[in-house]
């Protein structure tokens, strides 16, 4: 059976997705200035879909458009970042505590497999920053998937882009977090598999609060 070819995305959707990813990856860093003409040339399209994409990105809080400055990439405020870290702390503490309360051989094997995937990225010196961030986030998302609590997983999924921007900031400023974070993931998986509920919950809290500590230090 053959299927009809997929229709290409409208240009405005292509422009939106590509510009947003450039912002998320900080190829367009916070407080940088953009222009419709420059974006159109970079994306190889006219200014009309770019203008529509920018309007959508402004509505979502990624950029600000003003007659004086043009298009400015907005940074997450320090207060916003701390709020999202607290959000992670509440949800992931519950996830880890719940997983450790019901250990099983199947879950232990699944955790080992996920760590093996992450190790391939972490231990590869040629892994780009974006791949490291994606691998780190995939681990945390996997924990929620393993628990099987759909509302928690959906809540995390809705915040992935903001959490990605925060993780990019941490991994850029503190390259040593690549190995440190992975080592903490390994220990966390051992604690979950062993059913050490209190210890696992304490570790995930330390893991997330360390991010807050690093950011507070950077701001100071």
Image: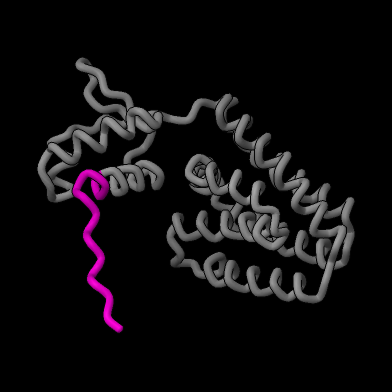
Report the quarter where the C terminus lies. top right
Residue reaching furthest to the bottom: 1
The rendered magenta stretch, by its main secondary structure, is classed as loop
- In the image, the segment drawn in magenta is 1-15
Answer left or right for 128 relative to 39.
right
Residue 191 screen position, x and y as percent? 83, 62
Q: Is residue 111 magenta?
A: no
Answer left or right for 173 relative to 71.
right
Answer yes or no: is residue 135 visible. yes
Q: Nearer the viewer, residue 133 or 144?
A: 144
Q: Nearer the viewer, residue 142 or 165?
A: 142
Q: Is residue 8 magenta?
A: yes
Answer left or right for 82 relative to 106.
left
Answer yes or no: is residue 180 visible. no
Q: Which residue appears at 64% of the width and 37% of the height? A: 85
Q: Which residue appears at 32% of the width and 40% of the height? A: 28
Residue reaching furthest to the left: 46
Q: Nearer the viewer, residue 20 or 154?
A: 154
| Residue 206 position by quadrant | top right
Against 110, residue 192 (above or below) is above
Q: Which residue appears at 38% of the width and 29% of the height? A: 74
| Residue 50 position by quadrant | top left
């Amino acid at each position: 059976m053959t299927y009809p070819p997929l229709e290409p995305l409208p240009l405005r959707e292509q422009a939106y997705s590509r510009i947003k990813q450039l912002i998320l990856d900080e190829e367009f860093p916070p407080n940088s200035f953009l222009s419709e003409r420059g974006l159109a040339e970079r994306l190889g399209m006219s200014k009309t879909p770019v203008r529509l994409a920018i309007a959508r990105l402004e509505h979502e809080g990624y950029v600000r458009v003003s007659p004086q400055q043009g298009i400015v990439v907005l940074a997450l405020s320090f207060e916003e970042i701390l709020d999202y870290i607290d959000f992670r702390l509440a949800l992931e503490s519950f996830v880890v505590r719940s997983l450790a309360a019901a250990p099983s051989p199947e879950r232990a094997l699944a955790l080992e497999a996920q760590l093996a995937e992450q190790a391939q990225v972490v231990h590869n010196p040629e892994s780009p920053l974006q791949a490291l961030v994606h691998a780190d986030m995939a681990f945390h998302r996997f924990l929620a998937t393993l628990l099987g609590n759909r509302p928690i997983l959906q809540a995390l999924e809705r915040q992935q882009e903001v959490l990605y921007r925060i993780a990019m900031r941490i991994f850029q400023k503190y390259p040593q977090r690549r190995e440190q974070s992975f080592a903490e993931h390994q220990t966390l998986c051992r604690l979950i598999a062993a059913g050490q509920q209190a210890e696992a919950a304490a570790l995930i809290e330390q893991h997330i609060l360390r991010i807050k500590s690093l950011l507070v230090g950077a701001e100071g």
